[in-house]
Image (cartoon, rainbow, N blue to C red):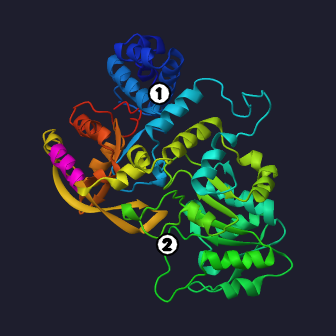
Amino acid sequence: MSNVLRNIPSVRELLESPPLKSLVNRVSHNVVVGGVRRFLDDLRGQVQGTTGINIPSASELAERIAQWIAVTEQQPLRPVINATGILLHTGLGRAPLSDAAIAAVDAIAAGYASVEVDLASGERSQRVVAVESLLTRLTGAEAAAVVNNNAGATVLTLAALAAGRKVIVSRGQLIEIGGSYRLPEVMSASGAVLREVGTTNKTRASDYAAAIGERTAAILRVHTSNYKVVGFAEEAPLTDLVALGRRHNLPVIDDIGSGALIDLVPYGIRGEPVAGQSVAAGADLVLFSGDKLLGGPQCGIIVGRRTHIERIVKHPLMRALRVDKLTLAALAATLQAYRDPQLAERSIPVLSLLATPLENLRNRAERLSPQISATGVAIAEVIEDESYVGGGSVPSQTMKTICLALTSKSHQAAQLAAALRTGKPAVVGRIKDNRLLLDLRSVAPKFDVALVEAVQALARPHAAPASPPEPNPA
C-alpha cells in the first residue's frame, strides 16, 4: 500500500507540468493548487485498501487534472444559443435584450448612476423616474412603478390595496404558472382574502356584483396566459368590470401577464391584451411583465391611477421588491424603441424573431445545412415545423418555422443534444423523431456562424467532455 501511495506525484511535481502551468495562466495559482490537492486526496482515498493498481504517470495525471479543473471552473450561468423554437424560454432567460439595452446596461454598470438623485437639483429622487414618463406615454396611464417581476407586482399591489380585505376573482382565472406559483397562495401571502366567483368556464359581471360587500377591496382580472378555456365558456368583459368598480368605488386591477405594449396580431399572435388598451378601457391598475412579450429585462410593471400607484410605492414591500440600476437602464432603452413601432420591430429581438418571414428562415437553413453536414458530425436536413412563443405565453398558438434536422453519424439524438448543450458555445435544440432539430425561428442571424462552430467543435478529437472526469487511476 505504501508503495502505491509513494507512486502518486507530489503537488509541486504536478504543478511543473505544461498542462497545469498553462492552466495557471488562465485561472489562478490558488485555484489550480486547490484543484490538484482535491484530486490527489480523492485518488489516495480510492487506492487505500486495494492492491495491484497502476498509478498513471505524472504527465498523464497532470493532463487529467487540468481537464477536470477546466470543466469544474466553467460557470453554471453561460451564454446559450436557443435553437428550441421557444422564443420566450423560461429556462433560457426569456427575452434576449436589444443592442441598445445591452449598451445602456454596460454604460450604467461601468460606474455610478443617477438612480435616486435628480442631477438638475441635486435633491433625492425616486428610481422609477428613469422609466415612468416612458411607461405613461406608451400606455396612457397617470403613473407607474417597477418591481422585480410580475409576481412581485401582484403581491405588492394586493398588499398595498387589499390587505385584510377581499379581492374578487373569477374561478376560471385562478392560475398556476411555472415554479408552482398559484394565485390563491400569492393572494394569501399578500394578506388579501380571495373571494372567488363564477365557475371554471363561465363567470359573468353579475357574479362579481353579487360578491361585493363591505369588506371588498378590489376586483382582479387575470389573463390566463398559459392555458385557454374553450367551448362553453364566458368571461366578463373588462369594460363591465370597470363600470361595476365605478359604481361601488372599487379599484379594478387587470393583470395581463405577458406585457404586450403593441398589438401583436400582425405577428400572428392573437388574444394577448395590450397594456394601453386596458388603461383606455378604464382599469385602475394594469400589471405586466417586462421580460416576455415586451422584450426587456425581467421586471414587473404597474401602471395606472396616480393615487393607487402612490399607495403602492409607499408600502414597505416596495423596497424589498424594487429593481436595480441595470434593470432600469435596460428597461428604459427597450421602452424608448417602442416610441417608433418600426424601430421596435427591428431592434427588439423577440419582435424581430416573430416578424421574420418563413422564406428568410429557409434561406438561412439552406446556407447552413451544407456547412454543418461538412463537419462530419451529422447530416443536416432542412425541414418545416412549428415554433411557440413560450410555454407560459400564448402556448396554444404556433408559428411556422424552418429547422435544421440533425442526424448524427455515430450517436443517438439525445447524445448529440447533450454534446451541443455542454459545448462551446452551448446550443440547446429539441428532439423529434430521433433527430435533433435546430429551430432557426429562435436563433438570430448573428448566431449562424457560432451555430456551425458549435457543431464543428464536436468533430475535434479532444473536445471537452460533458462532465468532469472522475479521479480514476486505472
Looking at the rendering, the stretch of residues picked out in magenta corresponds to 359-369
Q: Name the residue under label 2.
A: 227
Q: Identify the amino acid type marked 2.
A: Tyr
Distance between the alpha carbons at the discs numbered 1 and 2: 50 Å
Name which residue lies at 48% across and 44% down: 337
Residue 407 percent location from the top left of the image: 18, 52
Residue 405 seen in the figure: no
- Which residue is at the front of the view, 205 or 466? 205
Q: Mark 1 points at which residue?
A: 39
Name which residue lies at 60% across and 40% down: 327
Secondary structure that dominates the magenta span? helix
Residue 361 magenta: yes
Above or below: residue 14 compared with residue 457: above
Q: Mark 1: few, some, or many residues within 10 Å (few <14, many ≥20)?
A: many
Above or below: residue 23 compared with residue 442: above
Residue 191 percent location from the top left of the image: 80, 65
- Which residue is at the front of the view, 435 or 103? 103
**Mark toward the viewer: 1 or 2:** 2
Residue 258 percent location from the top left of the image: 53, 60
SS for dot 1 = helix
- Which residue is at the front of the view, 65 or 312? 312
